[in-house]
Amino acid sequence: MQWQGLFVAELFFIATVVVTFTGKLESQKGMLWSLVLLIPSVGLLIWAEAARSMWILIVGTAVTGVAAGLGYRFSLQVINEIAPENRRAEVVSSYLIACYCGISLPVIGIGIVSQSSGALVADTIFAVVTAILAVVAFVVQLRVSTTRCD
């Protein structure tokens, strides 16, 4: 039986629930929580792959769904807040193109790397890069938040 579709459905379902029920959360806090949750989410997914554990994969996918939902909802909210009203459609369109590139290009990279080194190695490299970028983005977001408060 092919389970991949169920995991994708789980991720999107949880992300949709998160988007639906986090309307009162402040955008800066939501983005920070998303970045924090990215680190255990990629760790759980790599652990699930290495251990060949369905249960770890279910939990990892759920955490990833929460991180994705928070990240998408609050980054889009910030884009809408900072975009000039007369250019909002252009800015949001550019944001969505960046999101699609961010989703598509790593898949291509993982495919290329996995051809020479195997799926687990490629996925681990992707997870480490994702975690590093999450930490960098977290630090930048904290600095932006403190600058706005000053």
Image: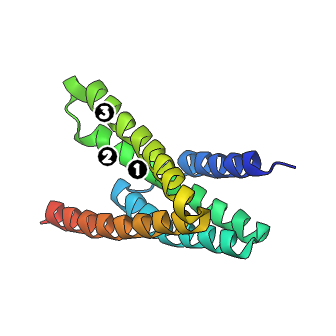
Q: Residue furthest left?
A: 150
| Secondary structure type for disc 1 | helix
Instruction: Answer few, some or many: residues within 10 Å of disc 3's Cα (few below 14, many 20 plus, some between 14 and 19).
Output: few
Q: Position of residue 100 (x, y in %)?
A: 43, 38
Q: Residues within 10 Å of mark 2 (few under 14, many from 20)?
A: some
Q: Which numbered dot is residue 74? A: 1
Give the amino acid at mark 2.
Val
Q: Residue at x 57, y 50 (%)?
A: 21
Q: Is residue 4 visible?
A: yes
Which residue: 30% across, 41% down? 79
Q: Which residue is mark 2?
A: 78
**What's under tag 1, amino acid-wise?**
Phe
Nearest to the eye among marks 3 and 1: give it: 3
Q: In the current view of this chain or complex, which residue is farthest to the right?
A: 1
Image x and y of residue 123, in percent: 54, 63
Out of 132 and 118, give the one closest to the viewer.
118
Give the mark, 3 or 2, whose residue is nearer the N terminus.
Answer: 2
Mark 2 and mark 3 in contact (Cβ < 8 Å)? no
Q: Which residue is mark 3?
A: 94
